[in-house]
Image (tube, rainbow, N blue to C red):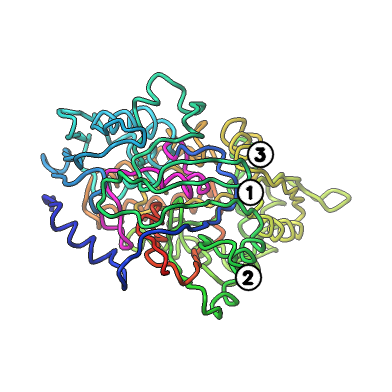
Amino acid sequence: MWTRILAGALLSLALSTFSAAQTPVRGGAAVIVVQADPGHLNPAISTGANVHAVADSLYNALVELDRDLKPHPDLAQRWTVSEGGTVYTFELTPNVKWHDGTPFTSADVKFTFDELLLKHHARTKAGLGAVIAAIETPAPDRVVFKLRRPYGALLQLINVTEAPILPKHLYQGSDPLTNPVNIKPVGTGAFKFESYRTDQQVVLVRNPDYFKPGLPYLDRLVFRVIPDSSAQTVALLAGEADYLPLVNAADVERLRTRPELTLAQTAFGTGGGNCINTLGFNLDRKALADLRVRQAIAYAIDREQILRDVQFGLGKVPVAPISSGLTWAHAPGTLARYAPVNVQRANELLDAAGLAPGADGVRLTLELLHFPTFNRSGEVIRQNLAKVGIKVVQKPLDRAAFVEAVFTQRAFDLNIISYCNGADPDSGVRRMYVSNNIGNVPFSNAAAYRNAEVDKLFAQAAETDNYEQRARHYAAMQKIVADELPYWWLTETVVTTAWRARYQGWQPWSGQVAERAWMRP
């Protein structure tokens, strides 16, 4: 049933959800670790975790999500749903200003969706691009989303990670990919930009004019770039960092014993949630266009070894293409045919594909592109595939080079991507498979997979707010992609976050992680 959602009730729930055990104290700073230099600070053109790790603290969205993924007011103070679920009217929060003093209006919302998110943000483009018919701005404090069909997932897909709102007056008429504001950002958020030193740190300071009374509590955030996971842990233990968004799996048990630290585990982290580390096949490559070769690779890779030796048991081996965290859409058992590892079957399939071993025992050489964080997973894959005569050449790349090679040039055989399924499959899952999401959009359909029935099933699932019907469509979709294997789903991940115990109020499930954080004297 479509209901009217009132801000008063939401704010009451928000206060109970976000309240701290003690009275917050204003002041102080926090050092937050990021794994790599973000490259830019425009979260509307990227799903990259290191961009959002910093930039989400600068911006807001129409709604924010609590730890249970329920929507609460952010830039929208209330909203109504009408005309059978096809019209969403958002009443905007009054007296919101951009960090440069310019008033925030509905024009900023429309511009951001039309010119940034629906063109450059892989998940939002995939999830909402075919749904939104028009965005209207009947008044500066009101924006109306007109949908082509009812879309029950909308509110879960317009938070700061999926749909941050950017300033029209600074982006209009420019190329959003190269606009200099990307590295000197202006937002509406709890913190304002102060400085950015490439490969070192980004500094944000408290926004004294923030529209949420009393927030934020901290005066300063320093996002320190520390690529090496061991060095991240050392920095936390030495007091040189205060918040570590993603603890190295090998260090989790050791950190649990430290009384000066607090640890939390969640399916959601900065940049997304319900993530599956996924091996992508370039279906434009002759060898990989052969289903038998892809099946052989699936049979040969020991995913339990990756989970055990790389993730130290933190996570799961996927049993379906959709994360088990999305319980209603998950189709367990879909991938059962590929377990356990079957080297004999893999060799039989490669023989049938005409890939006979050479004198050196090598049937095929494949280049595997990935971020440095996947070095160890890539090494396991290299060792596993060597047993069936496939030589894997690992090629670790930074984010910019990876995106260029995979999504612009399509110069790869295999890749590893952490595809975060998000709060709803129509966002984080759909982008991987639908044919209209192939192209120069980071972390979209990397395989260049095309299947008209899969496109249709995603469209049908998005046309209703009936979750039983949606689940049936997603189950059918998962069966098809399990048969056709455009990807191989390696491991589901669990995010372990650690922070110094003197800090309270962190929101590790949210991009606005530090909005309510405070430091005990």
Q: Which region is colored magenta? A: 43-71
Instruction: Describe the element under mark 3 as helix, strand or loop.
Output: loop
Q: Residue 375 or 188: which is nearer the viewer?
A: 188
As measured in the structure, the alpha-carbon distance from the residue carrying label 1 to the one carrying label 2 is 19 Å
| Snapshot quadrant of residue 236 | bottom right
Q: Residues within 10 Å of mark 1 (few under 14, many from 20)?
A: some
Q: Nearer the viewer, mark 1 or mark 3?
A: 1
Give yes or no for residue 92 being in the magenta stretch: no
Residue 195: x and y in percent read 52, 40
Residue 106: x and y in percent read 23, 32
Instruction: Describe the element under mark 2 as helix, strand or loop.
Output: helix
Residue lying at the far top of the rendered structure: 173
Q: Indicate the amino acid at tag 3.
A: Phe
Q: Residues within 10 Å of mark 3 (few under 14, many from 20)?
A: many
Q: Nearer the viewer, mark 2 or mark 3?
A: 2
Instruction: Describe the element under mark 1 as helix, strand or loop.
Output: loop
Determine whether, in the image, residue 134 is placed left or right of residue 32: left
Which residue bears the numbered disc 3? 412
As measured in the structure, the alpha-carbon distance from the residue carrying label 1 to the one carrying label 3 is 13 Å
Quadrant holding the C terminus: bottom left
Residue 371's disc is 1
Which residue bears the numbered disc 2? 250
